[in-house]
Amino acid sequence: MPLEVRLSEPPLLDELIGTLLQHGCVAHRSGASSCHVVHVHAAHAEEAEIELGLFMRAWLLAYPGVSAVVKG
């Protein structure tokens, strides 16, 4: 099941997608400020959502003032 990530700063979306791909996720743009993400190594949907949430918190540390919403 894909998760959706929506960024407050759309210009960073391509960078986020590239980073997700480098870390073994399947990710593609789904809107001007959003992408769909599949964590292919997660055992179940809850694990995917938890791990993507943790990943996003870490990724956002490099971008003060930027926020993201992860929806399952």
Image (cartoon, grey):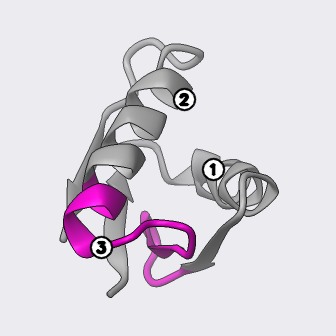
Q: Secondary structure at mark 1?
A: helix
The image position of residue 5, as x and y in percent, is 36, 61
The image position of residue 66, as x and y in percent, is 40, 28
Query: Disc 1, disc 2: CB below 8 Å?
Result: yes
Q: Earlier in the sequence, mark 3 or mark 1?
A: 1
17 relative to 2, above or below = above
Q: Which residue is mark 3?
A: 44
- For the residues labelled 1 and 2, the Cα–Cα distance comes to 8 Å
Query: Disc 3, disc 2: CB below 8 Å?
Result: no
Q: Nearer the viewer, residue 58 or 39?
A: 39
The mark total stands at: 3
Q: Secondary structure at mark 3?
A: loop
Kind of residue indicated by mark 1: Leu
40 relative to 8, above or below = below
In the rendered view of the protein, which quadrant contains the N terminus? bottom left
Q: Nearer the viewer, mark 3 or mark 1?
A: 3
Magenta span of residues = 29-49
Is residue 24 left or right of 41 when viewed as pictured?
A: right
Q: Secondary structure at mark 2?
A: helix
Q: Earlier in the sequence, mark 3 or mark 2?
A: 3
| Residue 59 badge | 2
The image position of residue 3, as x and y in percent, is 32, 73
- For the residues labelled 3 and 1, the Cα–Cα distance comes to 23 Å
Residue 47 figure quarter: bottom left
Kind of residue indicated by mark 3: His
Q: Which residue is mark 1?
A: 16
17 relative to 19, above or below = below
Kind of residue indicated by mark 2: Trp
